Image (tube, coloured by chain):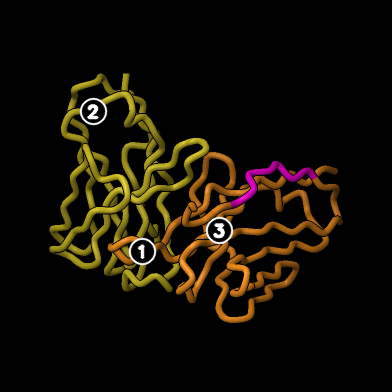
Chain colours: A orange, B yellow
Amino acid sequence: RKEVEQDPGPFNVPEGATVAFNCTYSNSASQSFFWYRQDCRKEPKLLMSVYSSGNEDGRFTAQLNRASQYISLLIRDSKLSDSATYLCVAPNSGGYQKVTFGTGTKLQVIP
Amino acid sequence: IAGITQAPTSQILAAGRRMTLRCTQDMRHNAMYWYRQDLGLGLRLIHYSNTAGTTGKGEVPDGYSVSRANTDDFPLTLASAVPSQTSVYFCASSEKGLRTDTQYFGPGTRLTVL
C-alpha cells in the first residue's frame, strides 16, 4: 500500500459548488497531516495543517478519520482561484522520519 | 525577505555532465530538503539535512549528492547526469526538521537531461 494515496481527478466543479477530496494514509501511527496547494508550474504552498479532529479556515475544512486512516479537504463556495492541485501530506514510515507527499488531486473550478 | 531561492530556473544538460543545483534560504531554518517532482509520481524526497553539517538520504538518493556547509545553503549535485533525472527539482526548508513542521518551497529548477 502506498504511504499516501489521492484520487488524481480532475474534479471539474462550477463556481459556488462544494467539493471534497479524500486522502488515505498507511502509517497508522501518524499524528499530523497537511494539505498543500500547488498551482500549475509553481511550488507547493501550505494550505492547512490537520491535527486530531480537524481544522477549519474560512471556506476550507480539513478532517481526520483515524479509524479509516484518511483525511479529507472540503472546499465550500468554490472560486475560480481555487483551481489548483491539492497535495495531501502524511508522516512516512521510512527510517528517515520525514513526510510523504501525495501525488495530488487536481481541481478545476468552471465559470 | 526572499524565503528560498533556487538557481538556475531551468537547464538543459547533456547526459554525463556534472550539474549543481543551488538553493539558499534566509529564514534561518535548521532543516532543508531536496525533492524531485515527476508527473504521476508526485514529490519524492532525494536528500535532506536536519542541521548544518549533517545530511541524510531520502526516498530516491541514487545519483545525487548534497552538502550543508552552513545554515543557508544546500546545493544538490548530479555527478553524471542521466535522462531519467529529467524532472522539476524543488528545494524546501523547515524550522526544525520535524514531521509537524511546515515546509517552505523554492520556485523550482526545471532540468532536462538529453
Query: How would you rate the neighbour count of disc 1 (Cα within 10 Å): few for under 14, some for 14-19, many for 20 or more?
Result: some
Comparing B95 with A101, the one in front is A101
**Relative image position of residue A16 (x, y in whole percent):** 86, 56
Residue wearing tag 2:
B81
Residue wearing tag 3:
A88
Q: Earlier in the sequence, mark 3 or mark 1?
A: 3
| Three-letter code, disc 2 | Ala
Residue A97, by quadrant, is bottom left
Residue B24, by quadrant, is bottom left
Q: Secondary structure at mark 3?
A: strand
Chain letter for mark 1: A
Give the residues in magenta.
A6-12
B72 magenta-colored: no
User: Residue A98 — which label?
Assistant: 1
Q: Secondary structure at mark 1?
A: loop
A10 magenta-colored: yes
At 31% from the left and 68% from the top, the residue drawn is B29
Quadrant of the frame with the C terminus of chain A: top right
**Relative image position of residue B66 (x, y in whole percent):** 19, 49
